[in-house]
Image (tube, rainbow, N blue to C red):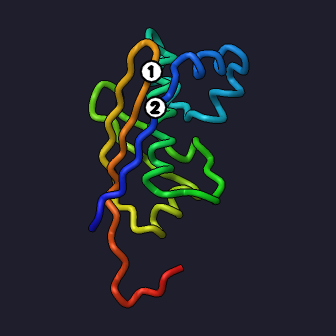
């Protein structure tokens, strides 16, 4: 077992601007219904930005370089408690192929910046496995 790390930093103003300019179209392209609901209320843009940073950190931890990555397939769940990552669709399948066994996630934000750090737990392939 090894740990694969990803982190990301997001400018809250960029997320707020995207929401203001593109509204629901932006939200539905990036976030799931549960994520949007979890971010509702004060600090909406800050919470969205932290989740965006988490999605990017997952991509880095999984070392997704050339594969399409629908961001709604990376969901950050857990309101008021420890956040966790749920992967579905093509991203979930890719994670499984790469030996992803879950992850630990940390989110933080200020009024201007949001960050996320992901430590993914990855099984090493068997020693007789053929590299792909």
Residue sitting at the far top: 42
Q: Mark 1 and mark 2: span between their CA atoms?
A: 7 Å
In the shown orientation, is residue 31 left or right of residue 42?
right
Location of the C terminus by quadrant is: bottom right
**Could you say where residue 46 lies in the image, as x and y percent from the top left?**
46, 19
Q: Which residue is drawn at 36% across and 51% down?
A: 5
Q: Relative to the observer, which residue lies in front, 50 or 34?
A: 50
Residue sitting at the far bottom: 128
Relative to 27, does residue 61 appear above or below in the rendering?
below
Q: Earlier in the sequence, mark 1 or mark 2?
A: 2
Location of the N terminus by quadrant is: bottom left
Q: Residues within 10 Å of mark 1 (few under 14, many from 20)?
A: some
Q: Which residue is drawn at 61% across and 35% down?
A: 30
Relative to 23, does residue 117 appear above or below in the rendering?
below
Q: How crowded is mark 2: few (under 14 residues within 10 Å), some or many (20 or more)?
A: some
Q: Which residue is drawn at 33% across and 69% down?
A: 123
**Could you say where residue 114 lies in the image, as x and y percent from the top left?**
43, 25
Classify mark 2: helix, strand or loop: strand
Q: Relative to the observer, which residue lies in front, 22 or 78?
A: 22
Relative to 68, does residue 84 appear above or below in the rendering?
above
Query: Any mark on residue 129, and which?
Result: none
Q: Do the residues labelled 1 and 2 touch (CB within 8 Å)?
A: yes
**Could you say where residue 18 lies in the image, as x and y percent from the top left?**
66, 21
- For label 1, the residue is 113
Q: Residue at x 55, y 47 (%)?
A: 73
In the shown orientation, is residue 85 left or right of residue 20?
left
- For label 2, the residue is 9
Classify mark 1: helix, strand or loop: strand
Q: Where, by quadrant of the figure, is residue 23 drawn?
A: top right
Q: Relative to the observer, which residue lies in front, 11 or 25?
A: 11
């Amino acid at each position: 077992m090894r740990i694969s790390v990803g982190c990301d930093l997001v400018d809250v103003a960029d997320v707020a601007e995207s929401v203001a300019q593109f509204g629901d179209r932006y939200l539905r392209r990036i976030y799931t219904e549960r994520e949007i609901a979890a971010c509702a209320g004060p600090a909406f843009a800050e919470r969205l930005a932290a989740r965006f940073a988490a999605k990017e950190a997952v991509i880095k931890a999984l070392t997704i370089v050339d594969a399409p990555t629908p961001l709604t397939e990376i969901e950050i769940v857990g309101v008021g408690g420890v956040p966790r990552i749920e992967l579905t669709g093509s991203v979930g399948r890719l994670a499984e192929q790469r030996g992803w066994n879950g992850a630990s996630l940390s989110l933080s934000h200020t009024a201007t910046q949001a960050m996320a750090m992901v430590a993914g737990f990855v099984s090493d392939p068997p020693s007789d496995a053929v590299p792909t």
